[in-house]
Amino acid sequence: MKILFDQGTPAPLRRALKDHLVITAFEQSWSNLQNGDLIQAAEAAGFQVLITTDQNLKYQQNLAGRKLAILVLPSTSWPKIQNHLSAISTAVNLLKPGDYQELTFSH
C-alpha cells in the first residue's frame, strides 16, 4: 500500500511498515496543508492510507465517501508507539478503502 504519514506521525514507524511504500507529508512538500486539503491531495496522488495522530480529524472533516483509509494513532511519542508496532502493522494490513480506525494503547 502507498501510505502517507501526517506531520505528527513519527518517521521511525516506517521501518515497521517495510512491506509498504511510506512517504511523509514533509517529503511530499505538504507540511503546510491542512487536513481537508491534505486528504484531497493524498487521494489525488494515489495514497491508500493516511496515518495521523490528529484525534480530532473525524470531527473536523467529512470523511464519508473517501477512498483513503485513515488510521489514527493515540500519540506522537515514538517511545509509546514503538511498543505497539505489531498492532499498528496489523491494523494497516486490515484497512480497506474509506476505513477510519482509531487505535488505543493500553499502556
Image (cartoon, rainbow, N blue to C red):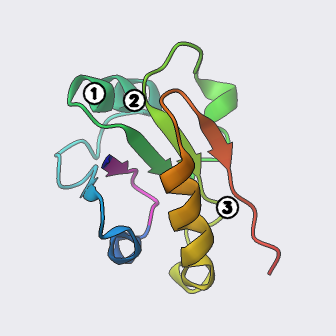
Query: Horizontal and vertical percent for residue 12?
Result: 36, 77
Q: Amino acid at mark 2?
A: Ile
Query: Horizontal and vertical percent for residue 32?
Result: 29, 40
Q: Dot 3 corresponds to which residue?
A: 74
Vertical order, 88 against 39 (above or below): below
In the image as oriented, which residue stretches furthest toward the top? Answer: 65
Residue 29 seen anywhere in this rendered image of the structure: yes
Q: Amino acid at mark 3?
A: Pro
Q: Which residues are magenta?
A: 3-9
Vertical order, 102 against 57 (above or below): below
Name which residue lies at 33% across and 48% down.
4
Q: Measure how far apart labels 1 and 2 are at the Cα level.
A: 6 Å
Earlier along the polypeptide chain: callout 3 or callout 2?
Answer: 2
**Contact (Cβ within 8 Å) of mark 1 with mark 2:** yes
Query: Horizontal and vertical percent for residue 79?
Result: 56, 86
66 lies left or right of 81 = left
Q: For the residue carrying disc 3, how many other residues have a C-alpha within 10 Å: few (<14), some (14-19), or many (20+)?
A: some
Query: Horizontal and vertical percent for residue 64?
Result: 59, 15
Looking at the picture, tell me which residue is in the foreground, 91 or 73.
Answer: 91
Q: Dot 2 corresponds to which residue?
A: 39
Name which residue lies at 53% across and 13% down.
65
Name which residue lies at 53% across and 43% down.
95
Q: For the residue carrying disc 2, how many other residues have a C-alpha within 10 Å: few (<14), some (14-19), or many (20+)?
A: many
45 lies left or right of 67 = left
